[in-house]
Image (cartoon, rainbow, N blue to C red):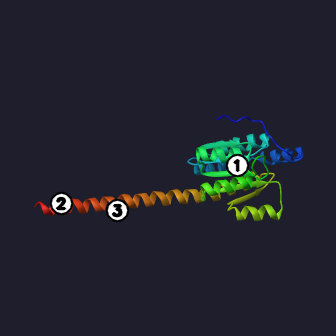
Amino acid sequence: MLYSKVRISPYTKPKRQEETTLKSFHKVSSMSDLKKLAELCNQFTILYAEDELQIQEEVAKTLRRIFKEVYTADDGKMGVELFCKYRPDMVLTDIQMPRLTGLEMAKAIKEISPHTPIIIATAFNEDRYFIEAIEEGIDSFLLKPIDKDKLFQALLKNIGYLAYQKKAKELEERQKIDEINHASEESIQALANLFP
């Protein structure tokens, strides 16, 4: 299914906020920080939902330098659809979007995959958003304009969690293989003892 870049929005954010967000995001962190983050993130995928297309393009461009794959959505409904289709490892979303808000999208995603880390970004600094985000199991909360360093810190925190999960799964699988190998060796030895 192809998605158009047309926004259907019952509201508009002030242009000043969009410009401030972009100027802040253009602050360049050191290339070595970006490379370190990319080394950690390059095996993971991320879904990024943002209805302000100029902000979406800027942030997605940076995310593409870091992550294995970046899926972008123009609203919460599209975000849920893309999540169901691609099952990204992590989600970064704006809070105020048409069709489904970021919090509604997060709730739907957590019902599908409770352990998927979700980072919410918002220009709203109101307690009700923080409380609802906590209730929905949001893993990190960023205020707009998005500061790259704070974004990178949130990504590192959640990548650390994903890397831990991946390593634990690998160890569990290795343990199962070891148990199967041990059981096989015992079976072979028991058969060998039957036929001296």
Residue drawn at x 79%, y 43% is: 52
Residue 172's label in the rendered image is none
User: In this rendering, would 84 be left or right of 128?
Assistant: left
Contact between marks 1 and 2 (CB within 8 A): the answer is: no
Q: Earlier in the sequence, mark 3 or mark 1?
A: 1
Q: Nearer the viewer, residue 104 or 177?
A: 104
| Residue density around tag 2, few if under 14, some if 14–19, many if 20 or more, within 10 Å | few
Q: Nearer the viewer, residue 164 or 53?
A: 53
- The single residue placed furthest to the left in the displayed view is 196
Residue drawn at x 69%, y 60% is: 138
Residue drawn at x 39%, y 61% is: 175
Residue tagged 3? 179
| Residue density around tag 3, few if under 14, some if 14–19, many if 20 or more, within 10 Å | few
Q: CA distance from mark 3 to mark 1?
A: 46 Å
Judge whether residue 183 can be spotted in this image. Answer: yes
- The quarter in which the N terminus is drawn is top right
Residue tagged 1? 30
Kind of residue sitting beneath label 3: Glu
Contact between marks 3 and 1 (CB within 8 A): the answer is: no
- Percent x, y for residue 51? 77, 44
